[in-house]
Image (cartoon, rainbow, N blue to C red):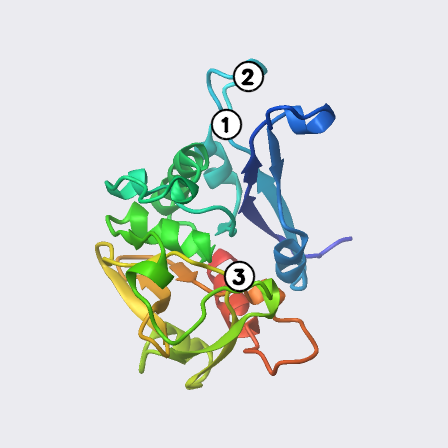
């Protein structure tokens, strides 16, 4: 259509599922997927969402010279979606339990992807694991397990999964407070057992839970690099009076445009 404005192109990092032993069919292959809700949340604003696959230069099927840098140059912004734990090896620790070992392969892919977008001056929004990865990329660390390392009154995950809800409070005069036009905070969907321990370089706290756990951050150096511990893509539930996260999406897409 003549005169139609080019839609924003947003990259979404891939969740990686590795081949499963004793499996058959597709589960014997490496799978790279996106969670439908996060893509649909972003697409409510007339946006093209493209999943960015990991680029293995030594992979058996690698027949081109495409790099993650090329995606950072082509796309207008990046969303790091949730998923498995960040490996403690990424911030200089050993896993305290085998099930907290995370996925170093995904960490390496997303850390490179994040740095390429930051170097290109493109906006980045981290969701849950994505927020944690931003903090680690900037030199911070995580609690490997909040219930055992930082016990508090707030349940940051439960068997209810996307029905596990708690309240967050925005930092006064912070970015979130401005984007949400002075709102104090709200109720959010929480699904995480890890959390930020030591803040990364030039990382500012944007929101906290009732127990003081960090629930949102932003990088103050330059550009838009922000992370939220909650899942805005799950806030379309009819019940629960959840925080309307459209101001967050609007600010991210404005930076991308």
Eye-nearest disc, 1 or 3: 1
The front one of 207 and 112 is: 207
* Label 3 SS: helix
User: Pointer 1: what residue?
Assistant: 55
Marks 3/2 in contact by CB < 8 Å: the verdict is: no
Which quarter of the picture shows residue 109? top left
Residue 204 visible in this rendered orientation of the protein: yes
* Label 1 SS: loop
Dot 1 alpha-carbon crowd within 10 angstroms: few under 14, some 14 to 19, many 20 or more: some
Which quarter of the picture shows residue 95? top left
Q: Earlier in the sequence, mark 3 or mark 2?
A: 2
Q: Is residue 159 left or right of residue 157?
A: right
Dot 2 alpha-carbon crowd within 10 angstroms: few under 14, some 14 to 19, many 20 or more: few
- Residue 37's disc is none
- Residue 253's disc is 3
Eye-nearest disc, 3 or 2: 2
- Taking 89 as reference, is 162 above or below it? below
Q: How many numbered dots are placed on residues in this image?
A: 3
Residue at x-position 38% and y-position 49%? 133
What's the distance in space between the residues labelled 3 and 2, CA to CA? 32 Å
Residue at x-position 47% and y-position 39%? 73
Dot 3 alpha-carbon crowd within 10 angstroms: few under 14, some 14 to 19, many 20 or more: many
Residue at x-position 68% and y-position 58%? 40
What's the distance in space between the residues labelled 1 and 2, CA to CA? 8 Å
User: Pointer 2: what residue?
Assistant: 62
Residue at x-position 26% and y-position 59%? 197
Coordinates of residue 99 in the picture (x, y in percent): 43, 43
């Amino acid at each position: 259509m003549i005169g139609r404005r080019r839609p924003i192109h947003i990259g979404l990092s891939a969740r990686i599922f590795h081949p499963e032993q004793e499996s058959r069919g597709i589960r014997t292959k490496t799978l790279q997927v996106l969670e439908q809700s996060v893509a649909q949340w972003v697409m409510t604003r007339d946006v093209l969402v493209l999943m960015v696959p990991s680029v293995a230069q030594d992979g058996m099927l690698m027949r081109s010279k495409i790099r993650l840098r090329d995606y950072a140059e082509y796309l207008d912004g990046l969303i790091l979606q949730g998923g498995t734990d960040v490996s403690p090896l990424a911030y200089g620790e050993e896993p305290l339990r085998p099930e907290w070992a995370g996925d170093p392969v995904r960490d390496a892919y997303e850390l490179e992807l994040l740095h390429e977008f930051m170097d290109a001056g493109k906006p980045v929004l981290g969701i849950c694991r994505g927020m944690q990865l931003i903090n680690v990329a900037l030199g911070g660390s995580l609690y490997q397990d909040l219930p055992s390392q930082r016990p508090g009154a707030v349940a940051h995950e439960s068997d209810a999964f996307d029905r596990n809800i708690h309240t967050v409070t925005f930092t006064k005069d912070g970015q979130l407070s401005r984007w949400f036009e002075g709102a104090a905070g709200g109720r959010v969907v929480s699904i995480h057992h890890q959390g930020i321990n030591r803040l990364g370089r030039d990382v500012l706290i944007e929101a906290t839970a009732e127990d003081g756990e960090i629930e949102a951050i932003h990088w103050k150096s330059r550009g838009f690099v922000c992370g939220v511990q909650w899942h805005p893509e799950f806030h379309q539930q009819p019940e629960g009076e959840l925080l309307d996260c459209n101001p967050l999406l609007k600010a991210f897409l404005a930076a991308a445009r």
